[in-house]
Image (cartoon, rainbow, N blue to C red):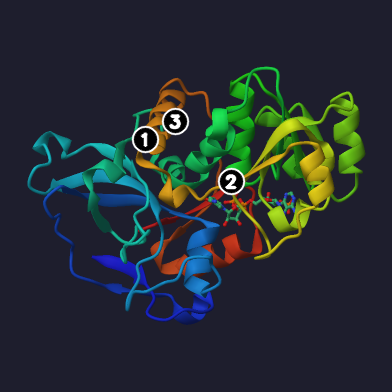
Amino acid sequence: MRAAFYEKLGPAREVLQVGDMPDPLPLAGEVRVKIAASGVNPSDVKMRAGTGSAANQYPRTIPHSDGAGVIDQVGAGVPPARIGQRVWVWNARWNRAFGTAAQFVTLPAEQAVPLPDNIDFAAGACFGIPALTAWQGVETDGGVAAGDWVLVNGGAGAVGHYAVQMAALKGARVITTVSSAAKAAHARQAGAEIVIDRKKEDIVQRIRSVTGGKGVARAIEVDFSGNMAWLPQVMADYGLVAIYGSSKPEATVPFGPSILANIGYRFFIVYNQPPALRVRAIAALDGMLRNNSLKHTVAASYPLADIATAHEAVERGAVIGNVVVLP
Ligand SMILES: NC(=O)c1ccc[n+]([C@@H]2O[C@H](COP(=O)([O-])OP(=O)(O)OC[C@H]3O[C@@H](n4cnc5c(N)ncnc54)[C@H](OP(=O)(O)O)[C@@H]3O)[C@@H](O)[C@H]2O)c1
């Protein structure tokens, strides 16, 4: 099969190679997926660059955790009826060397989830990380309730855009931050009621004003280190900050405002979602997909041979939406 891979960490153009590798065969309990689209996430890029939180311990790595395609072989113990099923996959490149940037991936059968016919493969290649992270941000620790004010920082991001939609679908009133008019329009279309330009406006004053001084019940945070200085000032009493990203490895948490407002800080990483939570997340996402409640944004797609360009686009934050590679 054709596959993209790297054998050392570093800049995309220096370390990513595209070449032939043996076709993988599914082991017992596994399926083989013929990949139609492979999703590129910031964590794939950071793992390849060697700047991520997780170490890369393999002599050769095929990148990318997310992808979608069709099951073309099954291992022992997996119903042969699954052959021909359209699927999206999760965690293909988590604690495993070979991800989806290839013509085939083999992985445990439960990591290949049926993809409804109304969803195309490119969109399906962006569920494992962006959509499931957004769902967890909205639902962790009891979840948001209808009528709650919820702040989604970075509502035009791949995760943020799904978080805005999922919170709004629950009847929450969503406030989001963006940094351009195009991103504002994108977040508004997702269901954000209040869109704040974080580069031009006083975020704290705006949020306190629209919430009548009460603050938000939940913040879904893309940049813990970047926003921690002011976040406690916009949280309602007993509010929860659900944190999935940070631009720097460390942050200072203001103690006084945090304790006085009884703020909870929940860090989470979607890769190691507890199994019961993942079952709930996948079922909830499946329901939203089947009744077409979500908008998907595949911003750019590249042939496998241009995988370095795809990584660079994600690295620069050059696009609004997801980037996919087509093997
Ligand atoms: N914990 C997890 O499991 C998990 C899962 C997925 C992603 N992540 C991490 O989450 C981050 C975002 O991932 P993504 O796929 O959504 O990336 P993305 O599509 O590039 O989106 C990031 C968004 O955040 C915005 N942003 C950047 N700094 C911000 C700040 N200080 N305040 C508010 N908005 C800000 C960006 O827009 P502007 O800068 O233009 O405003 C952009 O729209 C990455 O660091 C990624 O590694 C973690």
SS for callout 2: helix
Q: x%, y% of residue 173? A: 72, 23
Q: Give the Cα distance between marks 3 and 1.
A: 14 Å
Residue at the (38%, 28%) spot, across then down: 283
Position of residue 303 measured from the top left corner of the image (x, y, whole percent): 42, 61
Mark 1 or mark 2, earlier in chain: 2
Q: Residue furthest left?
A: 76
Q: Is residue 86 above or below residue 31?
A: above
Please tell me which of labels 3 and 1 falls first in the chain. Answer: 1
| Crowd around label 2: few <14 · some 14–19 · many ≥20 (10 Å) | many
Give the image location of residue 44, x and y in percent: 48, 62
Front residue of 202 and 161: 202
Residue position for label 2: 158
Name the residue nearer the viewer: 30 or 320. 30
How far apart are the alpha carbons under marks 2 and 3? 15 Å
Q: Residue at x 46, y 41 (%)?
A: 123
Q: Which residue is mark 1?
A: 276
